[in-house]
């Protein structure tokens, strides 16, 4: 029985900052951001969007009435949670109009969370082949303004529908995981921005990649040539390129060219959005599926998932004949191109206006064109609305 990713939907806000403008404002050479970090634009998440609304906007792009009937489990992966008790998945299920006979939970392990969600979903579907699971990867990547992490912010949500006979990617057996207690990046309770030891986090990411990649090759007997493309968690796109170079160290030149070409397709959208933490790997998958001209049914894709703290997994899937249909005809190039640029000072203002945790207040949402939005907090209850 084939189990895997049947549909993928993506949402990010309608606002962005141009990385050249951010570089000028921070007195940096623009090429540091464009080439050194590998980012062209950075999504700016307005106060009227949070992980719940972004997830609802992403899921609404893919779910049909029939899907909603079949979904019996919602797994919401995020490290930008909004409550210590109530799961984001419960709000989401109500917003999407899912039936009440479901399970709805929230999962966390930094940027690795969504991969854990997919693996859990796979097991659930194996036991319940008539069911579908909605896995959400949603985050708002926030570092301090003017901190070294600032150009690696971003945000958005990826919705993945997991089921039997998937249209996009059939998951294979034999993944390799690795966990070690490490302080490379963390978000202490009560703080609204991440803390990070930047250079160290890059080293840990690359060490973990080397470990799970080699372990995966040893376990499965596959070689580099058995893959059509390798995908990476992309906190910024240069990070994935560094990991790809490790995988390609013994590759033939023609083989390496092919992997680099596919990597360029796989980082196209991430370059335009920035980090979405746990959704980044799956935005990269969407970017490859959407932009690659060579990708064919039957080919194997490798996926490297990394979450600080730290946990990593390498796994693979086989591209399915109807993979384009699983994107539901959304023209993501157009979606990204139609966004509105904001100046650096506007971005800084929006950054400060977010309502966090137990604050009370209303949020300006009139200019937000998204279908689902966050209107504010009243009586300590978050107010979610649909246009
Ligand atoms: P920095 O110190 O500002 O930058 O921090 P730098 O001086 O290291 O420069 C960055 C790169 O730009 C370097 O290239 C420079 O050479 C190059 P590299 O040595 O890395 O190849 N550069 C230039 N290139 C072309 N033209 C120029 C130029 N100038 C410089 N003129 C850092 C960079 C990434 C450390 C910082 O932004 C940061 O701390 N970011 C956040 C942490 C992060 O994303 N870490 C990634 C691994 S951890 C992870 O992926 C998990 C995460 O997603 C969280 C989670 O799991 O939840 C973060």
Image (cartoon, rainbow, N blue to C red):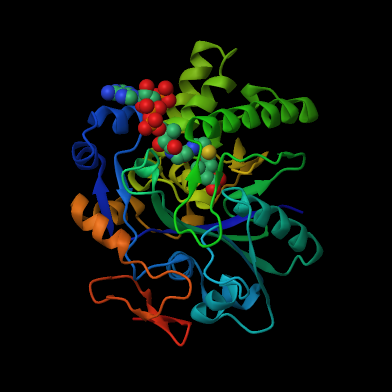
Judge whether residue 248 can be spotted in this image: yes
Question: Residue 3 appears at what percent x and percent y?
Answer: 70, 54
Residue depicted at x 70% and y 60%: 121
Residue depicted at x 66% and y 67%: 132
Asked if residue 93 is positioned above or below residue 132 in the image, the reply reads below
Count of number-bearing discs: 0
Q: Residue furthest front?
A: 190
Question: Residue 264 appears at what percent x and percent y?
Answer: 41, 32
Using residue 274 as the reference point, say whether residue 78 is left or right of it: right
- Depth order, front residue of 318/382: 382
- Depth order, front residue of 68/360: 360
When asked about the image quadrant of residue 225, the answer is top right
Residue depicted at x 52% and y 31%: 202
- Depth order, front residue of 270/4: 270
Ligand 1, seen in the image, is in the quarter at top left
Question: Residue 263 appears at what percent x and percent y?
Answer: 46, 31
Judge whether residue 292 can be spotted in this image: no
Quarter of the image with the N terminus in it: bottom right
Asked if residue 43 is positioned above or below residue 227 in the image, the reply reads below
Q: Residue furthest bottom?
A: 379
Asked if residue 112 is positioned above or below residue 175 in the image, the reply reads below
Question: Residue 10 appears at what percent x and percent y?
Answer: 44, 58
Quarter of the image with the C terminus in it: bottom left
């Amino acid at each position: 029985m084939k189990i895997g990713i049947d549909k993928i939907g993506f949402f990010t806000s309608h606002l962005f900052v141009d990385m050249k403008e951010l570089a000028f404002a921070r007195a940096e050479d623009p090429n540091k951001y464009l080439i050194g970090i590998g980012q062209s634009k950075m999504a700016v998440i307005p106060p009227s969007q949070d992980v719940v609304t972004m997830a609802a906007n992403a899921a609404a792009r893919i779910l049909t009435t029939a899907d909603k009937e079949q979904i019996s489990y919602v797994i919401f992966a995020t490290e930008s949670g909004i409550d210590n008790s109530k799961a984001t998945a419960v709000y989401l299920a109500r917003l999407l109009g899912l039936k009440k006979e479901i399970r709805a939970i929230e999962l966390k392990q930094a940027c690795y969370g969504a991969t854990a969600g997919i693996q859990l979903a796979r097991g659930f579907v194996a036991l319940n082949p008539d069911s579908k699971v909605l896995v959400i990867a949603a985050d708002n990547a926030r570092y301090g303004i003017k901190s070294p992490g600032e150009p690696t912010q971003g945000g958005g949500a990826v919705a993945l529908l997991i089921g039997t006979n998937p249209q996009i990617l059939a998951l294979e057996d034999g993944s390799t995981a690795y966990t070690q207690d490490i302080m490379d990046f963390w978000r202490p309770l009560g703080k609204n921005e991440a803390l990070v030891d930047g250079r160290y986090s890059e080293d840990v990411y690359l060490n973990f990649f080397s470990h799970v990649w080699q372990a995966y090759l040893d376990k499965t007997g596959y070689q580099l040539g058995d893959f059509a493309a390798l995908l990476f968690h992309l906190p910024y796109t240069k990070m994935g390129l560094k990991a790809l170079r490790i995988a390609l160290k013994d590759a033939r030149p023609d083989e390496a060219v092919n992997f680099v070409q596919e990597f360029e397709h796989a980082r196209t959208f991430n370059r335009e959005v920035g980090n979405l933490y746990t959704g980044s790997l799956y935005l990269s998958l969407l970017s490859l599926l959407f932009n690659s001209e060579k990708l064919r049914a039957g080919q194997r894709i490798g996926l490297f998932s990394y979450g600080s703290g730290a946990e990593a997994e390498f796994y693979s899937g086989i591209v399915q004949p109807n993979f384009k249909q699983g994107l539901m005809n959304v023209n993501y190039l157009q979606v990204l191109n139609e966004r509105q640029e904001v100046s650096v000072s506007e971005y800084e203002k929006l950054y400060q206006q977010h309502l966090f945790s137990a604050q009370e207040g209303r949020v300006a949402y009139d200019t937000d064109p998204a279908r689902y939005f966050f209107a504010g907090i009243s009586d300590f209850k978050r107010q979610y609305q649909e246009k």
